[in-house]
Image (spheres, rainbow, N blue to C red):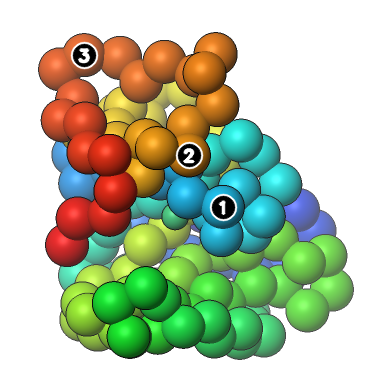
Amino acid sequence: MDATCQCGRLSVTLPGPTSAVVACHCSFCQRRSGSPFGVMAYYPRESLKITGKAARYERPTDSGGIFETFFCPTCGATVYARAGKHPTMLGVPVGAIADVAFPPPVRSVWETRKHPWVTIPEPAEHFPEGRS
Ligand SMILES: [Zn+2]
Ligand SMILES: [Zn+2]
């Protein structure tokens, strides 16, 4: 199972599906993804194999840490990300996996920023702001 960018030059090989899937409605995730919300699947770094060259962008977080995104320098798609709080884990955007059988989010965060028409299916846990 692979996550790949649009042009295929950057990819991440995953060990399989995971239930550690989080939907985030914050404005950074909206702007990063170009979608009304972001969905990431989290894996231990050592369980993933990264192929290709990535460009990196770092932004500060509300809690004083950093959040890094790694994206294809050719097509711009994010293929993995890392939160400073959890440096041994990488997040992989579920859209980059492009598999409709991938598990849904178990957690939905920053719902204060959620577009009102978006519904995250039960039994996900819901949080008005971030949660680590
Ligand atoms: Zn690409
Ligand atoms: Zn977010």
Picture quarter containing residue 58? bottom right
Mark 1: which amino acid? Ser
Q: Which mark is residue 113?
A: 2
Q: CA distance from mark 3 to mark 2?
A: 19 Å
Residue sitting nearer the eye, 53 or 131: 131
How many residues crowd mark 3 within 10 Å: few (<14), some (14–19), many (20+)?
Answer: few
Q: Which mark is residue 122?
A: 3
Q: Which residue is disc 1 drawn over?
A: 27
Q: Which mark is residue 37?
A: none
Query: Which-is-in-front pick, marks 1 and 3?
Result: 1
Mark 2: which amino acid? Arg
Q: Position of residue 28 (x, y in %)?
A: 56, 59
Q: Position of residue 109 (x, y in %)?
A: 31, 43
Q: In the image, what residue occupies the spot 36% across and 20% down? A: 120
Mark 3: which amino acid? Glu
Q: Secondary structure at mark 2?
A: helix
Left or right of residue 111: residue 73: right
Left or right of residue 104: residue 94: right
Q: Position of residue 83 (x, y in %)?
A: 33, 75
Residue sitting nearer the eye, 63 or 12: 63
